[in-house]
Image (cartoon, rainbow, N blue to C red):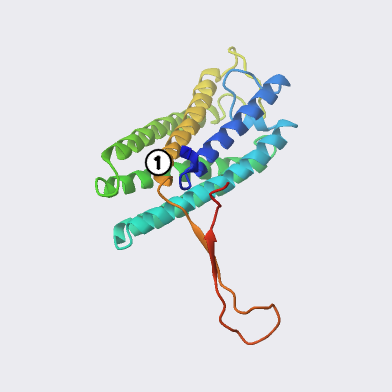
Amino acid sequence: MWWFQQGLSFLPSALVIWTAAAFIFSYITAITLHHVDPALPYISDTGTVAPEKCLFGAMLNIAAVLCIATIYVRYKQVHALNPEESRIIKLNKAGLVLGLLSCFGLSVVANFQKTAFFVVHVCGAVLTFGMGSLYMFVQTILSYQMQPKIHGKQVFWIRLLVVIWCGVSAFSMLTCSSLLYSGNFGTDIVQKLHWNPEDRGYVLHMITTAAEWSMSFSFFGFFLTYIRDFQKISLRVEANLHGLTLYDTAPCPVNNERTRLLSRDL
């Protein structure tokens, strides 16, 4: 049995691979058509102009669904491992809410381009990166509280390093983007897709875009730490029938069906 066939470990793997593919394909398309500059454009800029915006939006919507599934499985796993720890249960629920908000933000970013709906796009980005960062922080706290009883200390330290990486990237992006969009470097920055080294604010732009890509990679790294954990879990779906037919008759006892949510043959 291959590693990705064990449990639900394919979920975080598919999430990272699919999201990275969305970024790469839209980037290559935008570069080929000269819609953006090759040197570190905003991730959103690679999905602003047709046809790459269609690819960017469709693939990120699927990525949002994969992210929801991954976050939900993690929630169920932590809950099953700590059924009587009230502090962990509360943190786990908070993590679920934060993760779902981040997924919603990802869908908003995918469907509302920066140049057309700037305010909506920024709100989606804040949800994606902001709530996503808090989700990672909460999961790191959960990892700390579950070690060494549930898993080893190495998992906690790896996740902590990734969260620090994410925090440094977020601080850099927030600081430089606030200065860049303060109005001191022109009013057309929102619509600007091509930058030259001679442009005002070019250095701030490059730092902001580098921090955005770095923060995205930190998200990838964090979800990759789920692979080993997800090898230890599978979910089942149970169908409860109230009768042997679909007519309006009195309920009668029937044999319920319990099958895997996802077949191992997948």
| Residue 56 placement: quadrant | top right
Q: Nearer the viewer, residue 13 or 107?
A: 13
Q: Answer left or right for 164 relative to 123.
A: left
Q: Answer left or right for 240 relative to 149.
A: right
The mark tally for this picture is 1
| Residue 134 placement: quadrant | top left
Residue that numbered label 1 is attached to: 228
Q: Which residue is drawn at 51% across and 38% down?
A: 13
| Residue 158 placement: quadrant | top left
Question: Of the residues shown, which amino acid type is indicated by label 1?
Answer: Arg
Q: Answer left or right for 15 relative to 151.
A: right
- For mark 1, give the secondary structure: helix
Q: Nearer the viewer, residue 42 or 190?
A: 42
For the view shown, which residue lies furthest in the bottom direction? 250
For the view shown, which residue lies furthest in the front direction? 1
Residue 81 in view of the camera: yes
> Residue 80, how many percent across, how many down?
37, 58
Q: Residue at x 61, y 45 (%)?
A: 107
Q: Which residue is drawn at 54% across and 40% down?
A: 15
Up the image or down, 11 lies above or below 35; here it is below
Residue 101 in view of the camera: no
> Residue 87, how many percent across, how many down?
30, 58
Q: Which of 160 and 127 is in front in this view?
A: 160
Q: Which of 49 and 78 is in front in this view?
A: 78
Q: Residue at x 53, y 21 (%)?
A: 206
Q: Label 1: few (<14), some or many (≥20) within 10 Å? A: some
For the view shown, which residue lies furthest in the top direction? 198
> Residue 155, how many percent across, how many down?
32, 39
> Residue 104, how many percent across, how many down?
57, 49
Up the image or down, 156 lies above or below 68; here it is above
